[in-house]
Amino acid sequence: MQRLKKNKATASIPVVVLSSLTQKNRDRLITAGAEDYIEKSSIVPAPGVNLLPKLLEDILCRINRKHGVAFSSVPLHD
């Protein structure tokens, strides 16, 4: 994370971390510049339930709002 945020070419790219690490690591990654942290155990809380698409959509909307980008102005690809 530190290397990404120090490099001019990658510093402005939002980073979302997907990991099975503990809450303590989440706090450290957010402090280091990650936009968000998703714990693997929260993605599939029950068999057949996959929350990743909704979680990512919510995170992307929040990042776009933070940077003043309306979701409707983001190009969609087929």
Image (spheres, helix red, strand yellow):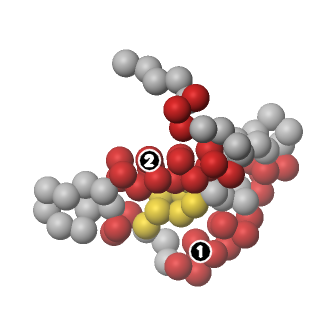
The image quadrant that residue 8 belongs to is top right
| Residue shown at 47% from the left, 62% from the top | 38
Instruction: Give the Cα separation between the discs numbered 2 and 1.
Output: 23 Å
State left or right for residue 11 relative to residue 55: right
- Residue that label 1 marks: 25
Q: Nearer the viewer, residue 61 or 39?
A: 61
Q: Are marks 2 and 1 in contact (CB under 8 Å)?
A: no
The image quadrant that residue 11 belongs to is top right
- Residue that label 2 marks: 57
Question: In the displayed structure, would residue 68 be above or below residue 20?
Answer: above
Q: Secondary structure at mark 2?
A: helix
| Residue shown at 14% from the left, 56% from the top | 48
User: From the image, which quarter does the C terminus lie in?
Assistant: top left
Q: Secondary structure at mark 1?
A: helix
Q: Position of residue 52 (x, y in %)?
A: 35, 53
Amino acid at circle 2: Glu
Q: Nearer the viewer, residue 56 or 41?
A: 56
State left or right for residue 39 relative to residue 26: left
Q: Residues within 10 Å of mark 1 (few under 14, many from 20)?
A: few
Q: Position of residue 75 (x, y in %)?
A: 53, 23
Q: Position of residue 77 (x, y in %)?
A: 44, 20
